[in-house]
Image: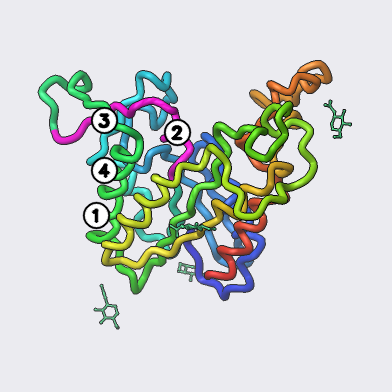
Amino acid sequence: MKMDTKNQQIQSVALKLLLVLWSESTPASSLVSLAYNATIEFYWVPYLVESNSDIDIIDIKKRIIKVDAIAERAKNWMGVDILVFNTYVWWMSGIRIKTIWGSFANGQEGYEEFDTPVAYKLALKTWANWIDSTINPNKTRVFFNHYSNVLLLRSQDWGNMEGVKCFNETKLVRKKKHWGTGSDKRIMSVVAKVTKKMKVPVTFINITQISEYRIDGHCSVYTETEGKLLTEEERANPQNADYIQWCLPGVPNTWNQILLAML
Ligand SMILES: *[C@@H]1O[C@H](CO)[C@@H](O)[C@H](O)[C@H]1NC(C)=O
Ligand SMILES: *[C@@H]1O[C@H](CO)[C@@H](O)[C@H](O)[C@H]1NC(C)=O
Ligand SMILES: *[C@@H]1O[C@H](CO)[C@@H](O)[C@H](O)[C@H]1NC(C)=O
Ligand SMILES: *[C@@H]1O[C@H](CO)[C@@H](O)[C@H](O)[C@H]1NC(C)=O
C-alpha cells in the first residue's frame, strides 16, 4: 500500500486491501484513491518465495518451492509505505513439501521433501532476510497477517456431528478459546520465532483465533465457481459448501478495522 494520508482517511480504501489479500488466486491488481492520493496494490504470490506454481497453478503433487529465492517476487514490493504480508493456505496441502534451494545440477529433480513447518520456516527466513536487508523501517511499515484458516474445517470441531463443513451454519461457535482442526499452530510459532530475530519490526495482525468462531461467516453454498453461482440443486448438496472464502462484509471487515487501528 502506498499512501500519503492521515489515518482516518484511509478507511474506505483499507477495506479493499484485505478483501483482495484474502482471495485465493486473484492476479495482481490495484486500486487508486485520488481523493486520498493512496494506492492500494494487491500482489499475489502463494508462498512468498518463488515456486513453479506462482503464475500457472499446477497440481499439488507437482509443486516445488524454491525456499531461498524471493528477488523476482520482491521487486514488486519496493517503494511501498506499508507492506502487509500473509502466506498460509497454500502450504496446507497436507503432503510433504517438495523443496529446492541453491543451484541444483539436476534442476527440479533435485528436490527434497520436508514437513510443512520445516519448508515454511526456510521460506520465511528468506523473506525475513530480504526485509532486513532491503527495507528501511523509517520509511516502510511491515505487517504480517496471521492466517485465518479454515481448511480441513470440520463440523465435529464445534460439536455438530452430522454437519458437513459450514453448511447451514448460522450461529458462531460458543465454546471459549475454540480452535479448529485446520489451524496449524506450528506455523504460527514459526512466524513468531522467525520475526523475533528480525531487525525490521514486524507487526502481527493476529486474527486467527478470533476468526475461528465465525463458522457462519463463510460463503457456504452461496459461493460461486468460475464466476457462476451454484444452482438450486448444487446448493442442496452440503459437499458444495465453500468454507475457505469469507463473506463480505463480515469477518474480513473486522480484520480491516484492526489494521486501521494499528495504522
Ligand atoms: C500524491 O503522492 C505523490 C507521491 O507521494 C506526490 O508526489 C504527489 O505530490 C501527491 N499529490 C497530491 C495531490 O498530494
Ligand atoms: C532511522 O531513523 C533513526 C532516527 O532518526 C536513525 O538513527 C536511523 O539511522 C534511521 N535508520 C535508517 C535505516 O535510515
Ligand atoms: C438447517 O438448519 C436448520 C436449523 O438447525 C434445520 O431446521 C434445517 O433442516 C437445516 N437445513 C438443511 C438443508 O439441512
Ligand atoms: C495469536 O493469538 C492467539 C490467541 O488469540 C494466541 O494463542 C497465539 O499465541 C497468538 N500468536 C502469536 C504468534 O502471537
Kindly report the distance in space between the C-alpha atoms of the residues bearing marks 3 and 2.
15 Å
- What amino acid is at disc 4? Leu
Residue stretch rendered in magenta on the structure: 87-102
Find out whether the residues at labels 1 and 2 contact each other: C-beta distance under 8 Å.
Answer: no
- What amino acid is at disc 2? Met
Is the distance from the Cβ of mark 1 to the nearest ligand 2 atom less than 8 Å? Answer: no
Mark 4 or mark 2, which is nearer the start of the sequence?
A: 2
Residue at point 63% right, 38% down? 157
Mark 2 or mark 1, which is nearer the start of the sequence?
A: 2
- What amino acid is at disc 3? Thr
Of residues 93 and 48, the one drawn nearer to the viewer in this rendering:
93
Determine whether, in the image, residue 143 is placed left or right of residue 262: left
Find out whether the residues at labels 4 and 3 contact each other: C-beta distance under 8 Å.
Answer: yes
162 w.r.t. 82: above or below = above
Kindly report the distance in space between the C-alpha atoms of the residues bearing marks 1 and 4.
11 Å
x and y percentages locating residue 44 in the rendered image: 46, 41
Mark 4 or mark 1, which is nearer the start of the sequence?
A: 4
Determine whether, in the image, residue 65 is placed left or right of residue 186: left
Query: What kind of element bears circle 4?
Result: helix
Is the distance from the Cβ of mark 4 to the nearest ligand 4 atom less than 8 Å? Answer: no
Tell me the number on the disc at residue 129. Answer: 1
Between disc 1 and disc 4, the foreground one is 4
Mark 3 or mark 4, which is nearer the start of the sequence?
A: 3
Query: Which residue carries the number 4 mark?
Result: 122
Mark 2 or mark 3, which is nearer the start of the sequence?
A: 2
Find out whether the residues at labels 3 and 2 contact each other: C-beta distance under 8 Å.
Answer: no
Query: Which residue carries the number 3 mark?
Result: 99
Kindly report the distance in space between the C-alpha atoms of the residues bearing marks 4 and 3.
9 Å
Tell me the number on the disc at residue 5. Answer: none
Query: Which residue carries the number 2 mark?
Result: 92
x and y percentages locating residue 130 in the rendered image: 26, 54
Image quadrant assignment for residue 80? bottom left
